Image (cartoon, rainbow, N blue to C red):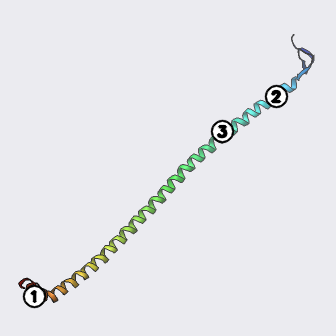
């Protein structure tokens, strides 16, 4: 059974109840359109925010990477400087010990040769 018009603004359904006033339909259509526009706007905002987050993450990663590289370079430079200083100190210590050994050898050389000779002829 087709719907019957009760008056100019209402539609009567198959069971005799009022389905919806005509102004309500127009209002619902407008509300639906407004809601879809808002959803579209919010989706656009979300997409822009997601893009902002991605760009920010990329920028932060690049900055942190550069900072880490600078820190590593500074540490390498410091370690190399410390190695050069340590090497120089060890070389100085080695030279001092070598000089002391040579001095002791020159001082005791004849005595040691004599002791070895005496040990061999006995």
Quadrant of the image containing the N terminus = top right
In the image, residue 109 sits, relative to residue 88, either above or below, namely: below
Query: Looking at the image, how many numbered discs can be counted on the residues?
Result: 3
Q: Label 2's element?
A: helix
Q: Is residue 52 above or below residue 34?
A: below
Between 9 and 59, the one nearer to me in the picture: 59
- In the image, is 39 to the left or to the right of 121? right
Where disc 3 sits, the SS reads helix
Q: CA distance from mark 2 to mark 1?
A: 122 Å
Q: CA distance from mark 3 to mark 1?
A: 101 Å
Q: Are marks 3 and 1 in contact (CB under 8 Å)?
A: no
Judge the density around disc 2: few (<14), some (14-19), many (≥20) Cα neighbours within 10 Å: few
> Could you say which quadrant of the image residue 30 lies in?
top right
Is residue 50 shown above or below 91? above
Give the number of the disc on residue 44.
3
Q: Which residue is found at the position 83% from the left and 29% from the top?
A: 27
């Amino acid at each position: 059974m087709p719907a019957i018009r009760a008056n100019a603004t209402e539609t009567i359904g198959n069971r005799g109840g009022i389905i919806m006033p005509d102004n309500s339909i127009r209002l619902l259509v407008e509300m639906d359109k407004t809601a879809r526009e808002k959803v579209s706007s919010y989706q656009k905002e979300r997409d822009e925010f997601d893009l902002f987050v991605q760009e920010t993450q990329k920028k932060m990663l690049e900055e942190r990477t550069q900072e880490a590289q600078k820190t590593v370079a500074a540490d390498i430079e410091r370690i190399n400087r410390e190695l050069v200083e340590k090497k120089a100190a060890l070389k100085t210590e080695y030279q001092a010990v070598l000089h002391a050994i040579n001095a002791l050898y020159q001082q005791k050389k004849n005595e040691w040769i004599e002791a070895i000779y005496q040990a061999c002829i006995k």
